[in-house]
Each structure stands twice: as C-alpha cells, then as structure tokens.
Image (cartoon, rainbow, N blue to C red):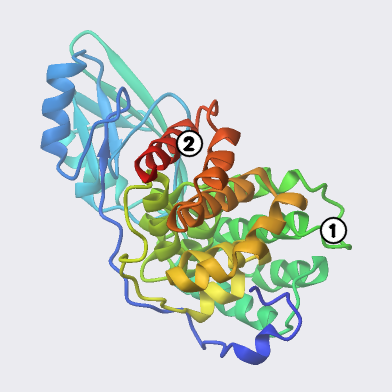
Amino acid sequence: MGFWHTGVMDHISLPSEFHWEYDSRPIIYHCSHCNYNSLIIEDLRQHRFETHPYNRPILYIKGKELGSTPFKITSCLSPSDINIENCTHSSVNGRSLPISELGNTLSKIHLDTVTVELEGLNVSAVFKLRFEIADEEDLAAVDIKFLEVARGRRLDMRAIEQFIHASKPYTSAIGYCDGICEYFYGVLAKERVSDSTLPYDSYREKFNRAADELKDFDRPLARVISALIAFHFNHFEETQKFSGPLRVGIAASRFKNWLTVDIDFEKTEFKNIHNNLEGLVTDIDSENFIRWGVSTNKELILHKEEIKSLLYKEISDFDRVKAYIILGRIALEQQDTKEALHYAREFRNSPTMGVWAEHIIEACKNIG
C-alpha cells in the first residue's frame, strides 16, 4: 500500500536512496510497419529491405524509427544509439555534416531542439529532435525530495505541491518530476480522495501522461511507477519489462499465465520479493491484485469471496477484468464448471477477453 495510507509507514523502512539490482533495458529495434522486432539493428534493416522496401531516409534513435512528429529525448545517447538508412548526406540545423559524424554530434547534445535533415536518392526527410536530458545530480535530488515528502505518511494535494516546490531548483529533471506528479494526481482521482478536484475518470489520462513522461527514465522510481501503470491497464508483458525483481512483475506473469488457462498455477514457481519502494507507491486496488497475484493456490482460494465482492463495488473496468481472471481460474481449480462458465460468458464477445473466455469454456469441456 502507498505511503498515503494511515499506518503503512510504520511497517516500511524508508531507504536513504533508491536502489535494487536490475539489468538496464536492452534496446529493441521495432519495425514501424508491422510487429517485427529484433535486438540487432542489422536484422531489422534486412527485414525492412525485404518486407517494406522504400527509398526514404530513415532515422532510428535507440531502436525507434522516427516520424514527422517531434521526438523527445530524455536520456543520454551514445553514437551507437543513432542509426540511419537510405542516406547519402546529413545536416543538423542547416549545417552540413558527414554521415559518419551524425551519431557523435547528436550524442553530445543535452538541452536543445534540433532539426536533422537526411538526404537520399531523390528524396529527403526532416526530423525534429527535442533534447531534454536531465543531469544525474538533479534526478537524484528529485528522488530525495520524494522520500522527504513520503516521510509525511500521507498523499494529498498538499504533499504533491510540497514535492513540486522542493523539486523546482532541479530544472533539468522537471520532466521526471512532472511524470511522478501526474501519477500521484491519478492515484488521488482513482482513490476518490476528498481534497482532489479531479473526477474519477481523469485518472486514466493522468496515468497515461505519467507513463509517457517516465518511459525513458531508467531509474528505480520511474520503473516502479511505469510497471504499476502497465499492470493496472492489464499490459502484463509491458509490466514485466519495467518491473525487475518486484511483486508486480511476478503478479503480471501469473495473470498472463492465467489468461491462457492451460498452466497449472498450483505448480507455478515464484518468489514474493517485497521492495520498499514498490510498497510506497502502489495504490490500494493494485496492492490487492498484486497480493493475490503472488499468493499460493491455497491462499488464493481463501480470498475467493473477497474477490467476488469486488464485482458489486465501484472499481475500474481494468480491475474488474483482473477479478474475473482470478475467479475463473479458481473455479477451474475447484472444478466448478457452472461458475467458470458464468465468468467466461461475461466476456465471450469481448474483443480483448474473448480468447480467454473460449479457453475457459474449452477447459470446462475437458473437466466434463
């Protein structure tokens, strides 16, 4: 539960700084025209040449193919993060530059807006890049200011305002601060906190803004918040990419398995790794679903009635889906085909949950 819940801080030891062992996210090169992706840029180039051939110059930044809209860069680049195709000449802000120097030149920019023009065979392309790379010292200072606010034990509008005011001197990290604040504004709306003027439904917009602001900050706090947002929206694979060795990642893995139905969750092995930082920023509903997601089979069945009661309460549509997933799985485990089919029929015609419903129905046939 988050630090805004009374008494929680009595059971959480605040770290002096944020740290856990995790691997930095690898660069994945995505094709902008289909679902193909690769860890190797040469493989993507071969795919593009064979499947989507055209002569327009292409610019990749950390594996992402840039389009006509301005592209914001919030983390330091190395020359190898910048790749081009179908290009014979380049320029930056109108200054001609050898192609071999483009990566080195862009990797040295931290705070600026630049225009990159690439020329190919009888065609050119223009790209707008917004560099907003924060200093490491500023990012660390914002983390510390967050911890100072967390020691107040409650999240409300005043706490967020204090955090914003305390973070103002660290100007290069303003985007990082904004992303954290958007998430907390979303939590206040989602939990219907009395001093929030935001309507309940606005939490989705706030969560999406937070995810967009924080996605490029490879820091523990940003990754935890990003994982929690992805988990709430039932983007379980994305949750795992952000989460590291945290409960939310384990829970996401379990939900992803339960969606396919054919995995026996009695035999699923996992470690319930608690992290103080995760506990600080998790909203009440997400905490419950994470807790159930890392529970053993016997423990989960004991919570069946508690989970069923959520279906009669005002919870988000995304959390309602998670409740059905768990209840459907419990019903199969107890071989209660009548109840399992009841849950499945709720989603049989759903474009996102229809496959899960069919899995449940098929499993019921096998039970007989």
Amino acid type shown at disc 1: Ser
Amino acid type shown at disc 2: Ala
**Residue under the image location 82 percent in, 50 percent down:** 198
The mark closer to the camera, 2 or 1, is 2
User: Where is the N terminus found, in terms of image quarters?
Assistant: bottom right
Location of residue 308 in the rendering, given as x and y in whole percent from the top left corner: 66, 56
Taking depth in this image into account, of 135 and 157 the one nearest to the observer is: 157
The residue at the far top in this view is: 122
Q: How many marks?
A: 2
- The answer to whether residue 325 is seen in the rendering is yes
User: Where is the C terminus found, in terms of image quarters?
Assistant: top left
The disc placed on residue 102 is none
The disc placed on residue 196 is 1
Position of 250 with respect to 343 (left or right) is left
Taking depth in this image into account, of 356 and 11 the one nearest to the observer is: 356
Would you place residue 31 above or below residue 218 in this image? above
Taking depth in this image into account, of 1 and 28 the one nearest to the observer is: 1
Instruction: Kindly identify which residue carries mark 2.
Output: 357
Position of 178 with respect to 94 (left or right) is right
Location of residue 113 in the rendering, given as x and y in whole percent from the top left corner: 47, 40
Indicate the secondary structure of the residue bearing disc 1.
Answer: loop
Taking depth in this image into account, of 247 and 243 the one nearest to the observer is: 247
Residue contact at pointers 2 and 1, CB within 8 angstroms? no
Categorize mark 1 by other alpha carbons within 10 Å: few (<14), some (14-19), many (20+).
some
Indicate the secondary structure of the residue bearing disc 2.
Answer: helix
Question: Residue 53 falls in which quadrant of the image?
Answer: top left
- The answer to whether residue 88 is seen in the rendering is no
**Residue under the image location 63 percent in, 60 percent down:** 307
Q: Earlier in the sequence, mark 2 or mark 1?
A: 1
Location of residue 69 in the rendering, given as x and y in whole percent from the top left corner: 47, 28
Location of residue 311 in the rendering, given as x and y in whole percent from the top left corner: 70, 50
